[in-house]
């Protein structure tokens, strides 16, 4: 079934990356709904390596802000929630649970190159799915790089197999703070049909 135009606009065409936020909270229930929607999207062998920390409290924000570059500090401080999209490089230990019909764990044990590629690719996909879930549930998102991964990892994932990938600010965007929409490449510039 094809989505209607309004739904396509919400997810893609009129959706924007927000930099400013309304002073309106995002509930824990909304965050659970976001996760419960995004978790169904596909990953290789259902590996699901993304790990998400929803940074919401003032105390947690104070732990995150020192890792932000100056241009991202204020929008992160004022966002109701900042999701740390991270990846677990030991994701394959959960494959007996997530992909039980074969010994998929054995594909990865001792193969660091495959672990690294699979982890990064699939956790990044899951972060993108989370962004779409945020939009689908009526919230706005502001995905970003522009932070010190090592500082975030030391603060939120010390002595862990989990490493940060990127961040997504979540809330109700302030449309008056949007930049003019940037152009996109045409089909001919970015794609081909063979």
Image (tube, helix red, strand yellow):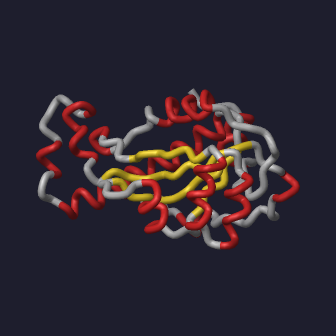
Number of labels in the image equals 0
Residue 33 vertical placement versus 56 (above, below): above
Q: Nearer the viewer, residue 81 or 136?
A: 81
Picture residue at 24% right of the left edge, 56% below the top: 115
Dividing the picture into quadrants, the one containing residue 136 is top right
Q: Is residue 9 left or right of residue 112?
A: right
Question: Residue 70 at what x, y percent from top left?
Answer: 67, 73
Question: Residue 94 at what x, y percent from top left?
Answer: 25, 38
Q: Residue furthest bottom?
A: 70
Q: Nearer the viewer, residue 146 or 111?
A: 146
Dividing the picture into quadrants, the one containing residue 163 is bottom left
Picture residue at 74% right of the left edge, 66% below the top: 182
Q: Is residue 168 left or right of residue 101?
A: right
Residue 55 vertical placement versus 144 (above, below): above
Picture residue at 40% right of the left edge, 55% below the top: 157
Q: Residue furthest right?
A: 176
Question: Which quadrant holds the C terminus?
Answer: bottom left
Picture residue at 27% right of the left edge, 41% below the top: 45
Question: Residue 106 at what x, y percent from top left?
Answer: 11, 46
Q: Is residue 142 left or right of residue 94?
A: right
Q: Is residue 2 left or right of residue 4?
A: left
Question: Residue 151 at what x, y percent from top left?
Answer: 48, 67
Question: Which quadrant holds the N terminus?
Answer: top right
Q: Nearer the viewer, residue 6 or 94?
A: 94
């Amino acid at each position: 079934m094809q989505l209607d135009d309004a739904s396509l606009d919400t997810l893609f065409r009129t959706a924007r990356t927000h930099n400013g936020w309304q002073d309106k909270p995002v509930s824990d229930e909304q965050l659970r709904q976001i996760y419960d929607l995004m978790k169904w999207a596909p990953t290789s062998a259902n590996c699901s390596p993304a790990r998400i920390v929803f940074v919401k409290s003032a105390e947690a924000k104070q732990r995150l802000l020192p890792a932000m570059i100056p241009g991202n500090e204020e929008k992160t401080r004022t966002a109701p929630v900042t999701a740390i999209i991270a990846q677990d490089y030991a994701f394959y230990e959960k494959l007996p649970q997530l992909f039980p019909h074969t010994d998929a764990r054995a594909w990865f044990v001792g193969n660091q190159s495959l672990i690294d590629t699979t982890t990064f690719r699939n956790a990044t996909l899951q972060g993108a799915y989370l962004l779409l879930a945020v939009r689908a549930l009526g919230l706005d998102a502001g995905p970003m790089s522009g932070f010190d991964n090592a500082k975030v990892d030391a603060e939120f994932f010390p002595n862990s197999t989990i490493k940060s990938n990127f961040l997504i600010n979540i809330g109700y965007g302030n449309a008056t703070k949007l930049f003019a929409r940037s152009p996109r490449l045409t089909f001919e510039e970015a794609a081909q049909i063979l």
